Image (cartoon, coloured by chain):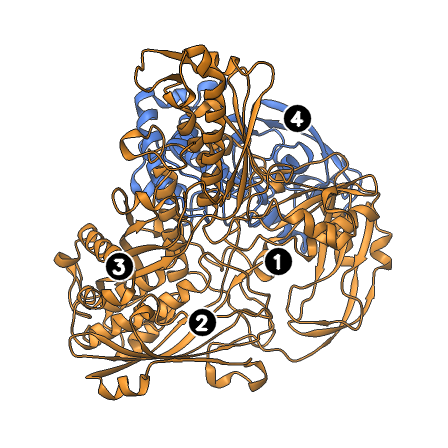
Amino acid sequence: MAEYKWPEEGKRTHIGKRISRIDGPDKVSGRAKYTYDINRPGMLFAKVVRSPYARAKVVSIDTSVAEKMPGVKAVKIIQEPGKEIQWAGDGIVTVVAETEGQAEDAARAVKVQYEKLTHFVNEQNWDTIPEANRRAPSQNVNGDPDKAFKEADIIFEGAYGNEVITHCCLEPHGLVAEWEGDNNLLVHQSTQSVSANGGQFAQALGIPAGNVRMKMEHIGGGFGSKFPVDSWGIEAARLSKMAGGKPVKLMLERDAELMVAGSRPSLFSKVRVAAKKDGTILGWESQTWGSGGVGNFNFAGLLPYIFRAGVENRKETFSVIGTNTGPQRAWRAPNHPQACLVTMSALDDLAAELKIDPLDLFMKNIDKTGARANVYRDELLKAAEMIEWKKLWRPRGEGAPGSSKTVKRGLGLSIHTWGGQGHASDCDLTIHPDGSVEVKMGTQDLGVGTRTVLAIVAAETLGLPLDAVKVHIGDNRFPVSGGSGGSTTVGGISSSTRRAAVDALTALFEKVAPAMNTAPDKLEAVGGAIRLIEDPSKSMTWKQACAKLGSQPLTTRGKNPDAGKGTLTTGGVGGVQMADVSVDIETGVVKMNNFVAAQDCGLIIDMKTCESQVFGAMIMGVTFALYEERVMDAQTGKMLNPNMEFYRLAGLADIGNFKVHMMTGKGYDERGVIGIGEPPTVSPGAAISNAVANAIGVRVPSIPLTPDRVLAALEKKGGANAKV
Amino acid sequence: MSSSDERSDKPDQGGVSRRNFLKGTSLALTIPLVAGGENEVKAAGAEVPILGPGNVNITLNINGVAKQVSVEPRVTLLDALRNDLDITGAKRVCDRATCGACTMIVDGKPVYSCTTLAVEAQGKKIRTVEGLEQNGKLHPVQKAFWDNDAQQCGFCTPGFVMACTALLEKHPAPTPEQIELGVGGNLCRCGTYVGIKAAIAQASGQIRKRGPAKLTRGGKSNG
């Protein structure tokens, strides 16, 4: 009976090492083909006419001029007259033409008349939100919060906010759709869900699910926003049919990508914390609200973030605010970054109020984090050492060493959690008689190193070098694997591949054992050879062994989960981040000095790409902590910055120095493989906001910490000339 | 704030960038634009070729190879390569000279090809990411990006590779300020800057060891 477990530390050839991603050469050379790069014979281009109004009724649509324009092959109305539009940028009409220019011209020639209706797009201030836009509030009371607040030595009150941000994938959402005959659809789509989306197309188009072929080699970012086939995906397929089945490419323009293809909900809060003098948290009260645009989202049940497990006396209310903006979509670790900002800011402010080092306050309450308290303790100590917390930290407003009259330095910290247990995944592993090995799976590599993980696990199990394994993904004809969300991919795909490889090797041993005069269970695969465990000198090369298969390749299917075949993935991680910033109190500009992380994620398959995930998440975090926000204009209801000049991402010069420490070895490795894409995106807003508060002596209530917000906070405190 | 870099959205001083073209069209309305392609009119004393509005046949020198293509004059260099020549390494992201994903090297200078007209790139040496490998071997900058995992989704990577190549051809041992300026016009969403900084350090070290002459196809460095 084969054993399904991960190899022990001393017996790993590839797992846990620093391995360069196997598709790296394709990406650095421009050979990697993304959906946007797909050029098919006779391909047509689609453009979308979009509503300029946040809320309006479509009165009439005239496509007659557009239809007769050069190169135009089809014009299709998506929203008929009479339909009420709920957000600016929603698609009204699609046109398809031979060239992009012709399609743009035709889209401009479509005449749509609207009846403008009132809209609401700014939900930051609770008092100005119309009653009609406040949807059913939820309330959650636990223990006896009133009593806790009565008995507290101190009650701290604060208000914190996160603005809406958009996913801003560099490759926009989109696809190339084409028909093969009347009944078969081929789709190249930029998606986080290759295996599942065929069925969605089939259902919408009335064809059997098996008739839809989905393909995607590479994807230029998703971050949670690229799961569905999307209304425009279905429209592209329909336009292709109208144009005789010719391939139709529909990729969102940059402004549409930012307006309609995904956003992270805002979250605003008023918080009260009850505590003892020594910093022990006794109770929590929060009123929160936020908007996912026209979409719904549920935030209840997360506050106080992480410490909820040990803060029994708490009361939280939450209201979803409806706004006339594009619908929200999952954004890395949905709801966690917002919950983290609210909680960690409040606790940091509480520490400042009590004149306690926040590191001490967190340590004091660490048991309230629940089952992983020891992990957080270790990670807090590790991160503190990395950033030299004890040496550099000064009480709020005093300025860390290096501060000047106008530039103040400060430190801040935050902790976070996430699940990340592996999703359902099937893997086919084939050993050919010539010794070559293939892995096939209907998964997708979002840039996290999925291909590389598959190669590492298969090569490790079979005792082969990495390049002996050929990996095929990104096709719904391959065995079904889950969508890439929730950091569930690496645990799922590594587990199914491990099991497939173990089974394949067991089958190969059975073929080889007679020739080596031994029993199959006396064999092992190491260093490109099959050999006797007891006597490694008796061996056969991998090639010779595979020749024993005869003419038939050997294919095994591995599954995750698979009852009776061990547990190779679990969920639940911790992480600590600490930021060191300098703030110019005359300009309000925040500069990152150092940013460190201590993070666990169970058994790490590839240390190099794993660390990249943490670095990347933190850099994305610097962006949402300091720069990015969707700015909605109250008057016109439009997004004011649907572009990359004013929807600002951090550049290379903005990030400062980074250090990442992955927690590995005993206590971590035996947990199996756990996802890493999301957890480190949670803390940056809180850690950086706390560092800024520590530097300037006052809380900037909302992120991003733009110069205007920093100056406004200083102003409230007495301006740049105030003693800080 | 991220510093703006030395990149130009026009191939040279005399060229017509899409930005300038768009700015100029409102002023040019008094001159009847003649369709057909080969006509020339006098405007402000200079010989100005009038192209379009239909397709014009142009020749582009891409990675040392002359490529014929028929495009409307409004088509950008980026779109001509991506849509008409199937050279898709350079990416279209912001489409307005902000993010650098479309970066190509034109006559030795890094250029935003999303904001450069194809017709204006005639007669110039256009280098794209596809042209960096030699004899199937990655260019030192490409190798450094791979070694240091300076990529995740990889959509910004070709633009960064070209911007870094142009930077190191001009400054083989760049100062931190030159690095910030040289790639300040490129943006990454996944957050690969830690890897990119390490990649620039590695490539710079190799290039200094080998000499800049080995860097460039044809053996000529800029700068």
Q: Judge whether A359 appears above or below A494 on screen.
A: below
The type of residue carrying mark 1 is Ala
Disc 4: CA contacts within 10 A as few (<14), some (14-19) or many (>=20):
few
Label the orange chain with its letter.
Answer: A
Quick one: which residue is furthest to the left in this view? Answer: A391
Would you name the residue on which mark 3 appears? A581
Which residue is at the front of the view, A361 or A157? A361
Disc 2: CA contacts within 10 A as few (<14), some (14-19) or many (>=20):
many
Pick whichever of labels 2 and 3 is earlier in the sequence.
Answer: 2
Dot 4 falls on a residue whose secondary structure is strand
Disc 3: CA contacts within 10 A as few (<14), some (14-19) or many (>=20):
many
Disc 1: CA contacts within 10 A as few (<14), some (14-19) or many (>=20):
many
For the residues bearing labels 4 and 1, Cβ distance under 8 angstroms: no
Subunit bearing disc 2 = A
Dot 1 falls on a residue whose secondary structure is helix
Residue B78 is situated, as x and y percent measured from the top left of the image, at: 60, 39
Pick whichever of labels 2 and 1 is earlier in the sequence.
Answer: 1
Q: Is residue A539 left or right of residue B107?
A: left
Circle number at residue A267: 2
Which quadrant: the N terminus of chain A? top left
Circle 2 or circle 4, nearest the eye: 2
Which residue is at the front of the view, B139 or A421? A421
Whole-number angstrom distance, CA of label 2 to CA of label 4: 53 Å
Whole-number angstrom distance, CA of label 3 to CA of label 1: 34 Å
Circle number at residue B49: none
* Discs 3 and 1 lie in a common subunit: yes
